[in-house]
Image (cartoon, rainbow, N blue to C red):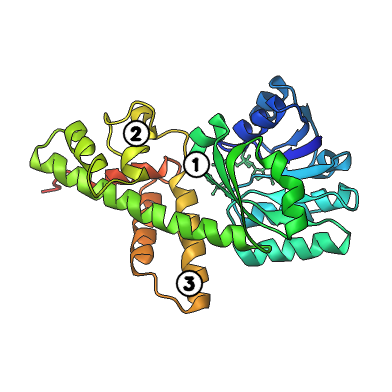
Amino acid sequence: MQIAFIGLGNMGAPMAANLLKAGHALTVFDLDQNAVEGAVGAGARAAASPREAAAEAELVITMLPAAAHVRTVYLGEHGVLAGVRPGVPLIDSSTIDPPTVRAVAEAAALQGNPMADAPVSGGTGGAQAGTLTFMVGAAGELFEHIKPVLLGMGKNVVHCGGLGMGQVAKICNNLLLGISMMGVSEAMALGAALGIDAGVLAGIINTSTGRCWSSETYNPYPGVLPGAPAARGYTGGFAADLMLKDLGLATEAARQARQPLWLGALAQQLYQSMSQQGLGQLDFSACVKLYEAQANPS
Ligand code: NAD
């Protein structure tokens, strides 16, 4: 299939690479020229704008940081909707708010393009391995049409309901992830302060009732997991500022639903502290740094 892929960052680049491996032809666009060159090296064709990327496409996929980028890429003067042919399906895999999904989908529907939201879980490791979970919000017919393509990048492709429901699932998952990573950091830092070996403590947690993805697959404490961002100075991975964005999506959705988010609100403030301290571009598991003893200014 001829696919336009826009947004080749930590997640988009390996997702696009897997589509190429699955035999699809890709036309790509990103503001970052290095990212484009990487995809071209893997076999994609470069386009000068989202509009140009979408012009020949039979399917459009976007993987962008936040809602503002999604609006620009679809609705801008040189955006997808200015170039795509009627009837071509559009999939946005970014994590954004459901109202933006609906606004962009309404504009797309006016020119005959059906849209799905399909945010993902599984991190950069899952993107590279092609084992992502896709949470899809779409009409049933569109879901069946796009499912085979998504299976080229993931192993679980779940129909969560109509348009926007993929984002609802994703926002709730990341609310829990943001809280659980803080919880694991707090427990690991306490253990270290009390003198237990970090590897021993992680091993106990991971065979006990505290076990979770944040402790087992992505442990924030340095020296526990060789493949986790903690082992490479918290580079790559999922930026703390993106987690801050996702907790903002959760608290805003909760405000509209008049639903309390006590732990989510606290976690949001903790990631905001990271951002204030200049740690926002590090992987979100660097939140363990908030628990490091500060130098005594006396
Ligand atoms: P990233 O910042 O690494 O990549 C985003 C890419 O979009 C960058 O290459 C950037 O240059 C490009 N971009 C920005 N504006 C653009 C524009 N107007 N036109 C074209 N390209 C543009 O982000 P990421 O980590 O790949 O995350 C992407 C989305 O996936 C986010 O919504 C994030 O919340 C979500 N997500 C990330 C992870 C993760 O582990 N990194 C996991 C699940 C979901």
The amino acid pointed to by label 3 is Ala
The percent position of residue 207, horizontal first and vertical second, equals 24, 40
**Residue that numbered label 3 is attached to:** 254
Instruction: Give the alpha-carbon distance from disc 1 to disc 2, as whole Å.
Output: 17 Å
The percent position of residue 23, horizontal first and vertical second, equals 75, 26
Q: Quadrant of ligand 1?
A: top right
**17 is higher (above) or lower (below) than 247:** above
Q: Do the residues bearing badges 3 and 1 touch, measured as CB atoms within 8 Å? A: no
First along the sequence among labels 3 and 1: 1
Q: Mark 3: which secondary structure?
A: helix
Q: Nearer the viewer, residue 82 or 274?
A: 82
Is residue 19 rendered to the left or right of residue 203? right
Q: Nearer the viewer, residue 248 or 76?
A: 248
Instruction: Give the alpha-carbon distance from disc 3 to disc 1, as whole Å.
Output: 24 Å
Residue under the image location 71 percent in, 55 percent down: 116
First along the sequence among labels 1 and 2: 1
**Residue that numbered label 1 is attached to:** 122
Is residue 156 rendered to the left or right of residue 184? right
Q: Mark 2: which secondary structure?
A: helix
The percent position of residue 52, horizontal first and vertical second, equals 85, 40
For this orientation, the residue located farthest to the top is 41
Judge depth for marks 3 and 1 and give the one in front: 1
Would you call the spot at circle 1 few (<14 residues within 10 Å), some (14-19), or many (20 or more)?
Answer: some
Judge depth for marks 3 and 2 and give the one in front: 3
Q: Which mark is residue 219?
A: none
Residue under the image location 68 percent in, 64 percent down: 162
**Residue that numbered label 2 is attached to:** 230
Rendered image quadrant of residue 6: top right
